[in-house]
Image (tube, grey):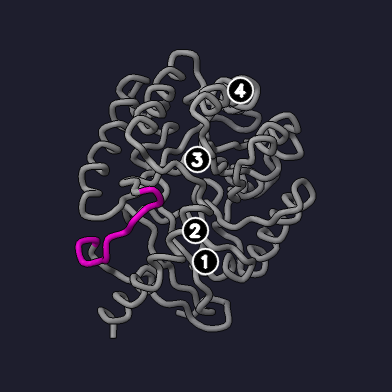
Amino acid sequence: MAYPHERPFAPVHDRLPYSPIVDRAPIAWPGGARVAVWVVPNIEHYEYLPPAGAVDPYPRTPHPDVRKFAYHDYGNRVGFWRMLEVLDRHAIPCTTSLNVAVLDHYPEIAAAMTERGWEFMSHGLYNTRYLTGLDVEQEREFLRTCNTVLQRHTGRRFSGMLGPNITGNGWTPDLMAEAGMRYHADWVHDERPALLLTTSGAPMVALPYSYELNDAPLLMRSHVEGEEYARYCIAQFDRLFQDAQEGGRMMCLPLHPFAIGQPHRIGSLDRILAHLRSHGAWIATASDIVAHYREHHYEADLAVSEAVHA
């Protein structure tokens, strides 16, 4: 079956050519760091009254669902600022997964992120508007709209994306490459960056996000609380640090202000970041990690892939 595009898309295993991590050339991070870490605050907006056709990711009642809306709203009113204090204490260069309409709705948050030089990664317009169900032209216009809003506020364009509520279509990486993006974070397939093939041949990097350490599902739905969450994160880092003797590894720390910004949980974030700093992690933005990978390791991974699939 051909998708409505210039030519049929390759099956997903050709998007991400299989390559065992044990067969790849060791990756080396700047300064001899064993583990690269990108910290991802998800700065989001859930619409109080989504338009007809929008998808409700957490259906409970017909809209307005005040309880759900207010819980997420707490993150922007209170949790963000508590989280920000801890991130500042540890001088964390963040990559924010941004519902770009936040820049219009919350100018104080926009200013705080801009002042700190955070990288903005597209997370769509709102977390109530998915890519799923859009055709190629609709998705192309969606990406244009996101870039237009970001350019109006910052003069910049998005260099990467985590799909809104992690949604996408078969052609999404191709449209991202067409829009000038360099990395896609939806793929949680590896412990280091990897090449992501596009139909145009434009280089794209799959930069693994994390579901395993994602504070929102862990703290909201899995009956995990602050200290246990901290143990999970530290245990993952420590094992990656050990395994990185054979070549650098990467860890993603996703954060949601409405979850980690709660008073009884914020101390756990402080503990996690202190541990990462004390063990010499290279804490960097997504673009810095992608640029280093592209310059030093992308071609080697591509050669391995081509040899395996020749």
Judging by the rendered image, the residue that carries numbered circle 4 is 81
Q: Is residue 296 above or below residue 62?
A: below
Secondary structure under badge 2?
Answer: strand
Rendering coords of residue 189 (x, y %): 33, 56
Please report the bounds of the magenta region as a residue range: 21-31
Q: Earlier in the sequence, mark 2 or mark 3?
A: 3
**Extreme residue in the right direction:** 152
Q: Earlier in the sequence, mark 4 or mark 1?
A: 4
User: Does residue 272 appear left or right of residue 126 in this picture?
Assistant: left
Judging by the rendered image, the residue that carries numbered circle 1 is 173
Judging by the rendered image, the residue that carries numbered circle 3 is 40
Q: Check disc 1: other Cα within 10 Å, few if <14, some if 14-19, many if 20+.
A: many
Front disc: 1 or 3: 3
User: Does residue 147 appear left or right of residue 229 in this picture?
Assistant: right
Mark 3 vs 4: CB contact within 8 A: no
Residue 24 belongs to the span the image colors magenta: yes
Rendering coords of residue 182 (x, y %): 54, 63
**Extreme residue in the bottom direction:** 310
Mark 1 to mark 3 CA distance (whole Å): 20 Å
